[in-house]
Amino acid sequence: MSVISCPMGGSEGRSRSSSTCPAGRMGPRGCAFAAYQMTAPSSYTPYGTPQDAQSESYLRARERKTINELLLPEAPPKEMTKGLKNADGLNPIDTDVLAMALGAPARRVLQRAMELGPMTGWKDGYLSSEHGFCPPDPSAAPVALSMSAGRVWSDLCERMPGIVARGKVRESILALPLVYGTPDVIPDQALWAATVCLGILASIYRYEEANDGSEGISVAAPAGAFRNLTGDADDEEEETRGVPRNVAIPLRQICTRMGRVLPHLTQFDVSIYNYKIRDHTSIHPYLPRCENMDLRWPVFNDRGEAMFLLCMAESHGCFIPGVEIIARCQEYVMLKDEEGLLQELVKLKEVVDQLPHVFHKISVNPNSGENFANPVEWGQRYAKFSAPLSRRVPALSGLALPLFLLMDAFMGRTKYDSFLGLEALHLRAWLPMNIRAFIAAVEYNYKVPEFVQASNNARLKGVLEGLVESYMGERGWMGTHRYKVYGFLEVVAKTGRSETNGNAGAGDDIGRPWEMVHKSLSESMKERLDPFRGAITQQPHEMRGSFEECRFKAPIVNRQFIDSDPSRSTGMVTFDLHNTGITYKPGDRLAVMPLNTWNEVAKVAAALGLDEMLDQRVPTDLAPEWTRFAKHLASVSRTTKVPDLTVRDVLRRGHLAPLTKDLVMAFHTILRASSKTTLELLACEEWPVPGTVGDLLQCAVSQVTPAIWDQAFDLKDLSWLPKLIPIEVPRTYSISNYSSGLLPDTIDLTVSRSDYHISPVLQVPGQSTLRHGVSSGYLNFDLSESHCTEDEEPLLVGVSRPLNFQLPVSVTVPIAMFAGGSGIAPFRGFWQSRTQSGYGRNILFLGTQSRDKLLYEDELRNYVRHDMLEVHTAFSRDRNGLVYDPVAKDLVEKEMEPRYIDTTIIEQGQTVCNLVISKSQGGLGGYIYICGSISVYETIISGIRQAIYNNWTSTKESAENLLAVAFAERRFMLDIFMSPKPISYNSPVITLAQLAQHTGHKEKSRMWLGVHGGVYDVTDFLPMHPGGSLIVRASAGLDATKTFDELAHTSNPEVSSLLSKYFIGHLATKPNFHSTELSELYDTWEIYLRTCVESLTTLHLEVDHIMKDSKVWFQNGLFNMGGVRKFYQFQSRLMQNGFSTIFGTKMQELHLKLSYSLASLKHGSSSSKFPDIIGIVTRAQSSPASAQASNEIAQIGQFVCNSQGAQFQENGILRYAQAVTQLDVEFLEEILGEVCTGMECFEAIRRVDDGRGKQQGILKTSAYLLTILERIAQRLEIFYSNLAAHTIYTPSIEANPARTRWNTLRRKIFDGSFFVLANESTFNISSSQYEDSPYRARRHEQQDVDFDAVINQVRAALSDSGEPPMPVFIHNDTNNSSNQERRGLAAEHLSRALPNLKSPSSFEVHEQRSALNRMSRFMDKNTKGINRLSQMPGLQGVSYEAILNAYGGGKNAPLPPIPKLPTAFQNAAESKPSPLPKDNLLHRRQHSPTSNSVNNQLGRQQTSPPLSSQRRDFSPAAFRRVQTSVDETTRSAHSSRGSIESDLSSSSRPRRPTLLSSESVGSMPVGLRVRGQVGSTNDGLKVMMAGMGGPRSEGGGARSEAGD
C-alpha cells in the first residue's frame, strides 16, 4: 500500500520509520487496512465510509471478510435458480474476484503515481487525486533547475521574447556552455523544467534557421556561419540534426531519463508544465485560470501564443477533480453502486460543462483585451515555431492532451478510423507512463457506459446522456471547439499558413483547408458518438437546431399567472423532470419540440379526410427526415424498437405554420394548380405568409373538385403526408429558475405568447383571423379558446448552454441585469442563485409597457424587502410607477410620466457607471447582462452610454472607450433576440459585382454578406457579434451560404431572426444563358471574382495587423525585429508568388477558355493573334521595377537578424512598410474593380439573351473579358513600378542622419552591393504611351500570340505546375497497398518550418490546384476542337485587333464602361375517442363518386396561373455596338467555315439580326416577368415555374415567431 493519510487518524503519511497509526495497524509500507485505498485529500472510501476515526470498526469488519463473503454473501434466490440448466453465470466473473482482491485498477495506478512521483521528480508523468494532470507545484521543477547547472537554459528561455525581438536568438544559443543532462548535474526534480527549456531552445533554433531573412526575397546566399557550428555528424539523429551540440546533447540525455525514445517537445510540455501562478490565494473556483496565470517561458510573448497555451493549461486546471471522480466512478461500477455512481457522474458533468467556457476565452475579437488571439499572428509565428523536431515524433497538437484522451476512454470510444482518430492513438503512445497506465485502466476495466446501459436506472441513463451532450455534443465541448476552429483557421489559411491539421489525407475535391479541418473534426465527433447514437449519416452541424437536440421527455405539470394582465399573454410553464437526469445552471436554455394545438390539427384533418384515421400508420420510406425522427424517438425512449409514426404524429409534430414558399408550392403542385388560394399566396410579395396549413386547406378544399382532391390526397396510401408536411423544429427558451439539489425536480419557463393575424388571402368572413405562435400558443395557450389538455403527452426537450450568458465565477462581484418584458426570464434564475449562494450586489432594471405586465412582482418585492435585490422599473404606457426606496428597502408607488428604460438608467447613472467602469479605472468592475430584443438592447446601451457621459467623462468618445473596455473584459453578457422579419420579394436585386464591392475593409465603409439568396448589411451588427468583426470580414463581399450552413446558423432561428433585420435585397441568381459556353465562362469568372474579393479582404487583415498594432514594431521601447520579420515575410510572399491566386493558374484558366471561345467562333487557326496575358505577367514579374522593389524587400530581410543595423533605418523601414502596404491594398482594389466590371457584362448579356444570337454573345463577351484580363495584367506592371519608387534608405528622416548614411555606405561596401546599387533602376515606359491607347497598350499589341502559344502555355502549366503533392492517407482501407505511409500531424506541422516563402499558403494551394484541375478537364473535353484549331491555316485579315475594331471602334477607342444596371424587382390501429374539437363550421372533404373521371378532368385542367408581364429595355451601353464591321470582316474571311454565323453563306440572304443588334432588340417579343424572371413567350410556363420554386423560395424567413 502507499504511504498516505491514515484512515483512522487522518494524519498525513510520514516516512516509513516514523509513521504511526492510532489503531496500531501500520505495516512496512503504510496503512495495513486492506480495505482502505483512498488518498489523503479525499473524504471518500470505496465502500462509502467517511474517512475519520469512527470508521475503524467498519474497516476491520470489511477486512475480516473473505472474498466469498464479499461477493457471495448469501445463496441466490430460488427464482433465479429454478429451471436453470447451466449455473455458471451464478458465479462472479474473474474481474470482480480480482477487483475484490486488489481494488479498482484506476485507483491502483493513482496510488502508485502519488507514491513514486515526489521521489522521482514525476518523471512518469504528473498524476494525483488532488492535482489531476497538473503539477502539485508549478514552480518546483523550475526552481530545482535554477539551483543546478541547467539554470543557463532557463535563464535564456526567460529572456527569449526579448532575444527574438532583437534578432539574436542563434548567437545567444550558440553562446551557451555545454551542460550535460546526467543525474549528477540535473536532479530528477528538475527534469520536467529541463525538458521544456531544451525543447524550446531546439525548436526556436530551427525556427530562426528557417526564418532568418533569407527565406524570402534575398540578394545574397543564406549565411552559413551558424550551420557550421552545429556540429552535424553521421550519428546525428533526425530530431537534433542542425541543432547546436550544446542543446542537442543534453536534450537527448534528458529525454532518455524521461523515458522518451526520441528527443521531442510535446503540447503538454509547453502548456500544462509551462505556467506560473500570479496569485496563489485566488483558488476559486480553481487555481490555474488564464487570468491567474502567465507563461513561464514564452517564446514570442504575444497574446495568441499565451491564450492558446494557457487555455490548454486551464482546461486541465478545471479538470483537476475529474481524475479522482473517474477513479471513483470505476470503483462504484465495481461495487455495483448505482446511487454513488449517479452522484459522481453529476460531478463529472459539472466539470466537463466548464470546458467550453475555458476554450471560449480564446477570443478573436480585437476588443477582448488580453484574451484576443490574433489568427494572423498565431498562424505566421507560433504555428511555425511549434513544428515538431521530426516527422517521427508527436506533433504539438491538442489531440495529445491527457484530458481528452482520458475522456475518450472513459466514454467508451471504440472507433478510431478517421484521420484524427488514428492520430489520437498515435499520440497516446507518446504520453507519460503514469497517464498511459491510468487511461488503460479506465478503458479496459469496469466500463461506466456499459454498466449504465445495462442498468434500469432512468436517472443514471439521463445523467450519462447529459454527459454525452456536454462532452461530445453539438452544444458541448466538441461542437464549441469545431465551430471556433472553423473561423479561426479560415483566417489563418488565407494569411499564409502552409498547412492545417486536417489537411492530411484530404483530396482536392473535399474543400478548402478550414473546411477540411471542419470535416475531419466532424468525422472524429461522429466516432465518439457512435456508441450512443449508432451510425450517424448526417453531418453534426445538420443536427443543430433540429429534433436531435431534444434528448429527453418531460411533461408539463403547471401553467400559472405571473402578472396582472387579464389576457395572460405571458405565463410561467413548469415541466416535471423526475427520472430524467437533466441538470442545468442559471443562464441555460431549454429546447422544446412544440406540438400543434388540436384546433389546428382539426382543420387539417377535416380538409384531408383524416378525422377518423389519426392512429393510422404513415409510411415514411419517402421522407427520410421523418424516418430519422422515428429512430430518434426510439433512442429517447431507450428502446431498440423503432415506433411506427401515425397521422397523429405527423399532424401534431409537423410544420403547419407559418406558410413558407416551399410549403405552399408543394400543395400547389400536388393540386395541379387548381386552387385559387395557392395561386394568390404564391403571388404574395413577403414570405413567410402569416397563416397555417389548416387555413390554406380550409380554403382550397372548397375550390378544388373532389376528383382532383382524391387523387392528390389518396387515403389508401398516406405516403404523401410526410412528404408534404416537414417536421417542426424546436424552440429555445431561457430557464427561469434555479435548483441547488443534485438533480432538479422541475424546470420553469417564462413564455410570452405570440399573436398575429392571418393573411387576407386566407381570411374567411365571420371567422377569427387571430392566430398564435406554434410553440408559445401551445405552451401558454389563450384561456378564451378551447384547448385539449387531458391527454397531453410529454414533450421532447433538451438543455443547451450559451457561452456568453453565465453568472460570474465570484459570488461577490456585483451584477446589473437589464431586461425588457419577457427578457426577465433568465434573470429569475440569476437572482435565485445569487441570493442563495452569494453576497454580491444584485440590481435589476426592468422595462415593461404597464404595471399589469410587470412579471414576478410579488417575488421581486420579497427579495427587495430582504435587501437581496434592487429593482428599478420603467413603464412606457403607464403613469403608475414603482420606485426603489433604498431606505425602506421596498418598491414604492409613485405617479410619473411614462418612460422607457434608458431614462431610468440615466437617473441611476452613478450606480450604473460604477458597475460598468473597470476596477483598474476606479470602478467596481461589475458584470452587465442584457436580455431582450434588438431595440431593447439599443435603448439600454444608449442609456448606459449617456449615463457614463453625464457622470464620468467629458466626451462621448471617452464614454465609448470605457464601454469598449467593459466589453473587452467580457463583463458585458448579451442575450439578444427578435421576431423574424418577413422578406419582401420586391426588394432590390443586388448583383455579385455590387456585393463584392462592399467588403467593409475601409473605415466607415459598409460590409455586406450574401446568405441563401439574400444580401445583408451587417455593418451595424458587428459590435454585437460574439467573435467581433475579424471572422466576419473573412466572408465579407461574398456569398457566404456554405459558411453559414457549416456553422449551423441556417438551422438557428435566433440567427435567422437577427439576420432578417439587416436584409437589404436579393442576391442575383446565375443567368439562365442559352449557351453552355457562356454559362461556363460565367462560372469561371465568378470564381475569379470570389478569389479577388478574398485576396483583398485577407490582405487587409494582414495589413491591419502589421501596421495598426504598435506591439508589432516596438517592444519595451525598442525596435522589434518581429515586426521587421512579419513585414518582410508578408511582402516577400506577395512578390514571389506574384499574387498567385489572381495572376496564377486561375488567370491562365480564363485566358485559355476565352482564347478558345474566340478561336472557335472565328473558325480561326493557330495564326490568329490573342493578347499574351501570361507573357505580360511574366515580364512584369521580371521587370527592372520588380527587381528594384525586390531588392528593397531583400534589404529589409537582412535586418531580421541584425537589430544593430536596423536601428539606423527605423523610420525608413516604418515609412516604407506603410507606403508599400497601402500600395498593396490599392492594387487589389483596382483589380477587384476591373473584375467587377467584367462580371457586370454578364448581367447585360442576360437581359438580351434570347438564344438566337448566342455565338455573337459569346464572341463579344470573350473579347471584352480578354481585354479586362489584359488590363489586369497591365496593372501588375504599374504596381511594380509604383513599388520601385519607394526605398527604406532615407537618412534625413532618421534620428541620426549622418550616422545612418555612413552605416549604409559601410554596409554596401562591405557586402559588395555598392556598385550594383549605384545604378538606379527606373520604369522606362512613360505614362504618355497609355494616353493614346487606354484600351490596349501599344507595346502589348506587338506582343500578341497565336492560339498555339496559348495552348503551349497551358500544357506547360499542367506539366510543370510544381504543386505540392497531396499527403497520402489510408482510411482503414484493406484494399489499399500497405506500402503507402500515413501522413500524420507531425508531417503536417513540420511543413510549417519549411524555409521557403515561395511555398503558397494552404488556401492558395487549394485554389491553384482547383484551377489546374479545371483546365485539365477543359483540355480533355475540348481535345478535338483544340487540335482542329491548332492545325487550320491562318485567316487573312482576322486578328484580335480586327475584332476590337469591329466591336469597339478601333484600338484607340476607350474601354467601354459597363452602365450601372437598373434595379429589378427582380394498416389502421384500434379506434380511440377522437381528441379533435367538434366544429361544424369546418370545411370537410367531399369524396368523388368515381375515380375514373379524374384523369379526364386533369387533362382538361388549365394550369397557367395569371401572371403579369412587363417590357424590358435591352440597351446596355457596353454592348450597343454597330455590327456591320464584324459581319463584313468575318464574311470576307477565306475560311472553309465561312462567316461568324454559319447559316449566312450567301450575301444575298437577308442578314439575321444578331443577339445584340438593334433590330433584334426592337423586334424582341414581350417577355413574361415573374418576380424578377424574364423570358420569351414560348418559355412563359417554364419561367413561371422557375419563379415560383426558385432559390428564393424561403425568402430568408424562419419557422419561429416572436417569443418562440
Image (spheres, rainbow, N blue to C red):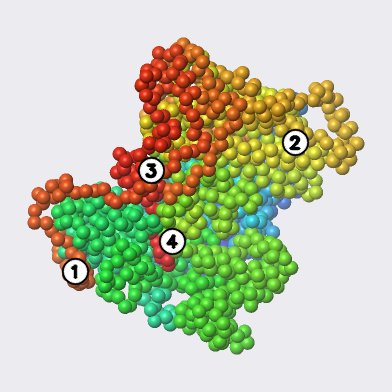
Left or right: where does residue 171 sit relative to residue 432? Answer: right
Up the image or down, 447 lies above or below 881; here it is above
How many residues crowd mark 2 within 10 Å: few (<14), some (14–19), many (20+)?
many
Up the image or down, 1205 lies above or below 61; here it is above
Number of the front mark, 2 or 1 = 1
Lower sequence index among marks 4 and 3: 4
Q: Amino acid at mark 3?
A: Val
Disc 4: which residue: 980
Q: Amino acid at mark 1?
A: Ser
Lower sequence index among marks 2 and 1: 2
Disc 3: which residue: 1574
Q: Secondary structure at mark 4?
A: loop
Lower sequence index among marks 2 and 3: 2
Q: Which mark is residue 1200?
A: 2
Q: Amino acid at mark 4?
A: Pro
CB under 8 Å between discs 4 and 3: no
Q: CA distance from mark 2 to mark 3?
A: 60 Å
Residue at image position (44%, 64%) is 979
CB under 8 Å between discs 2 and 1: no
CB under 8 Å between discs 3 and 1: no
**Residue 1043 image point, x, y percent:** 48, 46
Task: Judge whether residue 564 can be spotted in this image.
Answer: yes
Q: Secondary structure at mark 2?
A: loop
Q: CA distance from mark 4 to mark 2?
A: 54 Å
Lower sequence index among marks 3 and 1: 1
Q: Secondary structure at mark 3?
A: strand
